Amino acid sequence: MANKVVAIDGPSASGKSTVAKRVAAALGFLYVDSGALYRAVTWKALQEKVSTSDASRVSILLQNLAITFYEKEGIVCFKIDDRELKNEIRAIEVNENVSKIAAMPEVRSQVVVWLRDMVRFGDLVMEGRDIATAVFPNAEHKFYLDASEEERAKRRFQEIHDGAEKITFTDVNESLKRRDAIDKGRKMDPLRMANGAVKIDTTGMNIDQVVQFIVDRLKACVF
Ligand code: DC
């Protein structure tokens, strides 16, 4: 039987990553952070001083990218040039450029191929923006997480504040809005809720409640 995919989409700071990781652990599925791939391409472009607005140069960079995939501790991971990327793909410069890179059709087509191929590792919980609409439109289980703009900005501010970076709440709010606008407005596979997806407004919910809601729903299905 084909390996199963649980798709979890939603905007930045909607709680997807934490929820998806916990749902994967509860089900014994592997976790996939699809945004990390867009971030890695962005990081590599910045490293190589390739303009993140120059689609043809980014495309060449992509063709020459040495990327390998492997499973580690319940996560499908990757290496670029034999190097595991950690905090570097969460840097402010990457945050500010990744939506532009993720809007490039050449980049999206390649990342979708990488993501689809990951089912060879096992059953997956994959989170992103287009998992249920474009990567696995036939996934049986689709969730769309959202939260009010204010709540999402508060969460992101808290995260950044914990990392001790100096940035104001207004900056965080504006940056989120900019990224939302690009993610929702791009031509290819914009962020939107897929047909048949279950929408969860996580405003006022804690992580445990969201995880429980999803796990209960999945366990109620013949899975
Ligand atoms: O979830 P994240 O913040 O790590 O995502 C980084 C960027 O990649 C963000 O601009 C949205 C984009 N992205 C996407 O377009 N499609 C995905 N499946 C995942 C992320």
Image (cartoon, grey):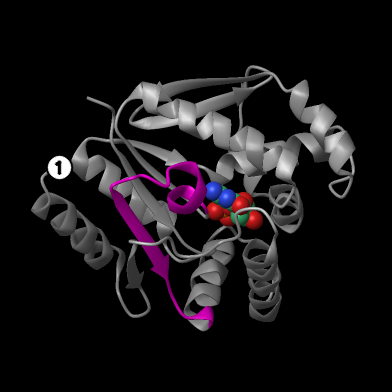
Which residue is at the front of the view, 50 or 72? 50
Which residue is at the front of the view, 48 or 178? 178
Q: Which residues are magenta?
A: 130-149
Which quarter of the image is occupied by the C terminus? top left
Quadrant of the image occupied by residue 84:
top right
Residue 90 within the segment the image draws in magenta: no
7 to the left or right of 14: left
Which quarter of the image is occupied by the N terminus? top left
Q: Is residue 132 above or below residue 2?
A: below
- Residue under circle 1? 223
Report the residue at 20% width, 41% height from top. Answer: 27
Quadrant of the image occupied by residue 174:
bottom right
Report the residue at 76% width, 23% height from top. Answer: 63
Q: Position of residue 123 (x, y in %)?
A: 29, 32
Q: Is residue 186 above or below residue 199?
A: above
Q: Is residue 181 above or below residue 44?
A: below
